[in-house]
Image: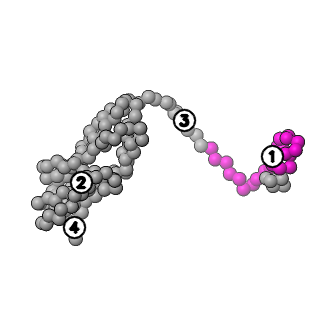
Amino acid sequence: MNFRDIVYGEVNTKTAVSTIRSISSGRRHVIKINRIAAEKTNYLSRRARTKNLISSPTDRIAIFANEYVPNHFTDEEWIKYSLLINGKTYDIIPLNSNKPGVKIIKYSKYKDGESHAIILDEPIKEAYLTISIITPDPYETPYLSNLKVVSGKGV
C-alpha cells in the first residue's frame, strides 16, 4: 500500500486510517533548545573605530559590506563609513553598494578623474575605519554584516 492508496482509499467514508509501520533504516534525531528567553532590546546609535588596518604601505583601500535597512525607514544614511588615511578623514561607501559616492581610495601619480575614487599623493601608511550606525528609535535598527576591508597594490 502506498501513500496514494491510503489518502484516496478512504475518501468516501471520511474516516481516518492509522497504520504504524516499523522502518529499520529510519533515524531519529532530537534537537533541544534550552533556556530561551524573550527580551526587549533598546538600540542606540553607535560609532565604532578600528585599530590601524595597514601593516605595510599599500596603494589602494576600500570596504565591502552587506547592509540591511528596513523598507519603512526613510531615505537617510543610516550606516556611515569613514576612513582616516594618513591623518585625513574620507567618507566612503562599500564597493558592493549601489549608492553614489567614493568607493575606493588610492595612491597614484596620475589623476584620472574617476568620480568613485579619491586619488592620494602618497602611499597609504595608516588607515582607521569608523562606522556609525544610526537608529531611528530604540526598537529597531539597520543591520551590517560581512564587513571586509580590501587593500592592495596596483599593477
Question: Is 129 inside the magenta-drawn segment?
Answer: no
Q: Where is mark 3, residue-wise?
A: 34
Which mark is in front, 1 or 2? 2
Give how far across and how far down residue 106 sits, in percent: 19, 60
Whether residue 102 is situated above or below residue 141 in the rendered picture: below
Quadrant of image for the N terminus: bottom right
Q: Badge 2 local density, few (<14 within 10 Å), some, or many (20+)?
A: some
Q: Where is mark 4, residue-wise?
A: 154
Q: Where is mark 2, residue-wise?
A: 102
Residue nearest the viewer, comparing 132 with 75: 75
Quick check: marks 2 and 3 in contact, CB under 8 Å? no
Which mark is in front, 2 or 3? 2
Whether residue 126 is situated above or below residue 16 in the rendered picture: below
- Magenta range: 7-30
Q: Earlier in the sequence, mark 3 or mark 1?
A: 1
Q: Earlier in the sequence, mark 2 or mark 4?
A: 2
